[in-house]
Amino acid sequence: MLLSRRAAGMSSSTIRDLLHLADRPEVISLAGGLPDPDGFPLDAIRDAVAHVLAGRTTALAALQYSSTEGDPGLRAWIAARHAAVTGRPTSPSQVLVTTGSQQGLDLLGRVLADPGDVAVVEEPGYLGAIQALRADALDVRGIPVDDDGLRTDALEDALRRGLRPRLVYTVPTFQNPTGTTLPDARRRHLAGLADRYGFAVVEDEPYTDLRFGGAPVVPVAAQSDRVVTLGTFSKTLAPGLRVGWLVGPAEVVAAATRAKQAVDLHTAGIAQQIALALVTAPGGIDEHVRRVAATYAERARALRAALVEAIGLRYELTDPGGGMFLWAAPRSDDAPDAAALLHAAIARGTAFVPGEAFVVGELTPRRRGAMRLSFATAPPDDLRVAASRLAAALDDVVGRDIRRI
């Protein structure tokens, strides 16, 4: 056999395979974790590309091999931004530009832990993190999430009982998949636990700028030196740029840089230069991001209101203050299995991701029945239709009108 044991043990998700059926044009999908392509700043990107390629010197530099650490100007911009939101001095030497933040997560799984070490994730938690950390041969454990994000009290209980993770991964702001946000008290608690028990916190912030209103919450990185922050332009500009970053202690960034050097040498120089041109243009990207967030806010309200009307008697729905997702959790243990419901939903013309995809521990009936629903890519009227179709699919599965239960 040509494959390693690790590669031979990798399998495609049956849920992911099934969701390919949702690509039909008549399906209104609530499944994808994709930003709305209509929100990509095409004119600004065209201008940025023209700017980067206008002069021979800058064009050739953008197309040549470059340093593993990333473009100095872009690293300086990221460092200044990180310092502004954390209140902590941040040097460009603490920044590594990555090929999307997913690469940053993979690199951290390798430089913060050894095969067999424990890594803690939120449960339900980001599927890409579960996959990346397992691919790094780590022992992935879940700590439950409630309406206020990661239950740091449950994490502390597990630590007291002897759990010793090398890292704790969290999406504290508008979490994927639930849309919840970790409040300030829990962020301080998590930072304190990291300092006390010696693990690293990987704070993934892909959605933090997609806030629908109110004041931002201070990052965990403001509370401890044991935090590595992941960021990306995928949700605010365009994922096709594949430009992300990590910011952390110098020794971690140096180790991650060496690991990246062995993987892809550096993130595409032209993509970095395009991103830098966008963020340093007059006015930057703040107004663009506000428009994207306002669009998502309208869609989130439309979908949640329609779901409350259609299935609210049977499912509890999170109420996200930003981001791209909300979570529907069954109110009782007799709810249909969401993987089976997905078949009926696709037949009715909509789709979602079943909750079991985001779970690393025991699949309880309520976890099996939960759904992640994305509002990012469909207009409000389509989202209302999708909610109606989902209710009809539930009727098909349970054999009665659940809205009257």
Image: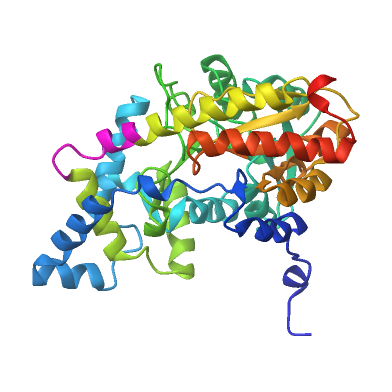
The quadrant where residue 307 appears: top right
Residue at 38% across / 51% down in the picture? 238
Numbered label tally: 0
The quadrant where residue 24 appears: bottom right
Is residue 164 visible to the viewer in this orientation of the structure?
Answer: no
Residue situated furthest bottom in the rendering: 1
Quadrant containing the N terminus in the rendered view: bottom right
Quadrant containing the C terminus in the rendered view: top right
Q: Position of residue 146 (x, y in %)?
A: 69, 23
Q: Position of residue 229 (x, y in %)?
A: 46, 39
Horizontal side, residue 199 vs residue 248: left or right: right
Q: Position of residue 266 (x, y in %)?
A: 37, 65
Horizontal side, residue 313 vs residue 167: left or right: right
Is residue 108 visible to the viewer in this orientation of the structure?
Answer: yes
- Magenta-colored stretch includes residue 282: yes
Residue at 50% across / 33% down in the picture? 380
Residue nearer the viewer, 133 or 244: 244
Q: Position of residue 398 (x, y in %)?
A: 88, 35
Q: How is the image coloured?
A: rainbow
Is residue 180 placed above or below 80 in the rendered structure?
above
Residue nearer the viewer, 170 or 314: 314
Tell me the magenta residue range.
281-291
